[in-house]
């Protein structure tokens, strides 16, 4: 494989800004309980992104 053909490692670039979010234990427990009701169960970040999209209007 030539230098230009090598596979890239890691996550592909996306047009998004990462954030850090801290939640109180009771709110985190609610998030986990609600996402556990879904099939397939989304990751925490995906569940929170979906909640934001639903409230955008």
Image (spheres, rainbow, N blue to C red):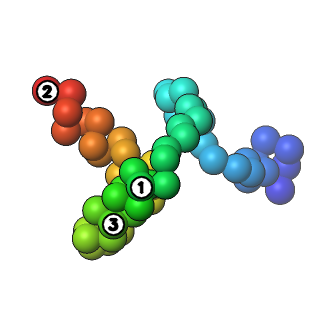
Q: Is residue 5 above or below residue 39?
A: above
Rate crowding at label 2 as few (under 14), some (14 to 19) or many (20 or more) other CA atoms within 10 Å: few
In percent of width and height, residue 34 lies at 28, 62
Between 31 and 11, the residue placed more toward the observer is 31
Q: CA distance from mark 2 to mark 1?
A: 26 Å
Between 8 and 50, the residue placed more toward the observer is 50
Name which of mark 1 and mark 3 comes first in the sequence: 1
Residue visible at 63% across and 47% down?
11
Image side of residue 24 versus residue 2, left or right: left
Q: Do the numbered discs 3 and 2 sit on residues whose CB atoms are within 8 Å?
A: no
Residue visible at 50% across and 29% down?
16
In percent of width and height, residue 39 lies at 27, 72
| Label 3 sits on residue | 33
Image side of residue 17 versus residue 48, left or right: right
Q: CA distance from mark 1 to mark 3?
A: 11 Å
| Label 2 sits on residue | 57
Which part of the image, by quadrant, shows the N terminus?
Answer: bottom right
């Amino acid at each position: 494989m030539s230098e230009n053909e090598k596979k890239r490692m890691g996550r592909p670039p996306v047009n998004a800004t990462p954030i850090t979010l801290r939640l109180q234990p009771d709110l985190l427990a609610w998030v986990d309980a609600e996402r556990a009701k879904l099939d397939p169960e989304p990751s925490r970040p995906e569940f929170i992104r979906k909640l934001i999209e639903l409230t955008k209007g």
